[in-house]
Amino acid sequence: MSYNLLVKVTARSISGYLVATFTVAGISLVGYRWLHLNATSVALAFLLGVLGISAYYGIRHAVFMSVLGTLAFNYFFLPPIGTLTIADPQNWVALFAFLVTAVTASELSARARREGREAVERRKELERLYAFSQLLLSSDNAAELLNTIPRYIVESFGVRSAAIALSSRTDVYRSGPAIDGIESHDLQLVALRGEPRFDGSLSFMPLRIGMRVVGSVGVSGSHLSRQTLEAIGSLVAIAIERASAFDKLSRAEAARESEQLRSVLLDSVTHEFRTPLTAIKASVTSLLGTGLHTPEENHELLTVINEESDRLNRLIGEAAEMAQLDANKVEFTFSIEPVRPTIDEALDELKQLLCHHPVDVRIPADLPPARMDPAHIREVLVHLLENAAKYSPADALIRITAEAKDKDRMLTISIADRGPGIDDFEQSMVFEKFYRGRNQRVQVHGTGMGLAICKAIVEAHGGRLGLTSQLGHGSVFYFTLPVG
């Protein structure tokens, strides 16, 4: 106990005795000299005083007042008055009845006060345990949780320091740099024996899940009850087990998705790479064969080699770009730009592909500029326009529109086609990597990475890529950009 606390407790105790003395003196003076009360009224007044002292100061002060009140009651109110002798034997009964009643009443009052204080402490501990359990749910990462749990214990329960050790790990996780008496070998010993240990202000509790002990927790400067420490140990053990299970589940899910992605990637890339390689191989074999080709045939074979090489290069580029976007390694250069020049550049790049499709561009003259990286937004437009041209019949109209919505400060660019449409089941899947429409996988070449790349680029701009479609009537792909 600190010096200041000792002085405070001593001063309160002395003041309690003084208050009890002055209360007895006051009741005796008022009852004897001024109001001339009878013995019964004075006895009741003394009992009320004893109850008040007991409720505020405790049992020791109440017993002191009971004895002092008995002497005053005998001296001032039981004949012969003015002496401590009792002439009538009945007054002995009254005197002892008063003393026993006063002591009993003070004991009952002190017990009620003590139980009320304990109930308040239990309620506070329950509130702390609830808040502590909520903190334990704030993280699903086992390593992060182990580093923060000791600090949570200190913050939630007002202890000086805390530490945790697990049976499966050699590290000790502490609330601070100071060991503060919580030695690692003590933690290991408690975890090994599975029994709690209390040593003054030091408390060690095993982390138990059912009959299995997974570690131990040590607390320094603790005045918590054993039940609360056991509850802390159980909550910590459950939280660690939950985080460990979540980590295992996450790793298993990541491994499953990785295997699935590997399978899809292998299937898609193998199929798409084989097609241009086959064409290139066939053309080269033909050129190296008889050599009896006309200049027109040689030019045609070389054109096939050139186009298929470009296609193969593009497939590799898309795969590399998708990997960079997933790893957040693509650098964007944002600026405030009008969207019309970027749309015109995309149309010019696809001039040969769009020669069989009329394109209707409807951009309002007062359309505000957008915050964007023009090169990457041009890439998004190229992908969307290329899809519209590939999946639409010849001479089908492709319409490009743009509008600004003031309420959310976003600019929306839409590309509508007259293709076969996409059913509701596939609309949520077309933006996934390597996914291609069930009915279009053979008719139209591609890896299924174009829309995934567009989605990653648009989201990096703070926008959203979406789709509305109706079977037999075409699709509308749209994306949003923040207004500059």
Image (cartoon, helix red, strand yellow):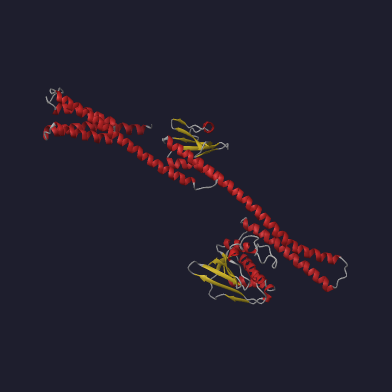
**Quadrant including the N terminus:** top left
Residue 53 shows in the view? yes
Q: Horizontal and vertical percent for residue 66?
A: 23, 29
Residue 484 shows in the view? no
Which corner quadrant of the image does residue 86 belong to? top left
**Between 418 and 18, the one nearer to me in the picture:** 418
Q: Is residue 95 above or below residue 406?
A: above
Q: Is residue 290 above or below residue 396?
A: above
Q: Horizontal and vertical percent for residue 120?
A: 35, 40
Q: Horizontal and vertical percent for residue 129?
A: 43, 42
**Between 186 and 12, the one nearer to me in the picture:** 186
**Between 244 and 292, the one nearer to me in the picture:** 244
Q: Residue at x 66, y 77 (%)?
A: 395
Q: Is residue 108 above or below residue 300?
A: above
Q: Horizontal and vertical percent for residue 399?
A: 60, 74
Which corner quadrant of the image does residue 125 belong to? top left
How many marks are shown on the rendered structure? 0
Q: Is residue 322 left or right of residue 69?
A: right
**Between 283 and 5, the one nearer to me in the picture:** 283
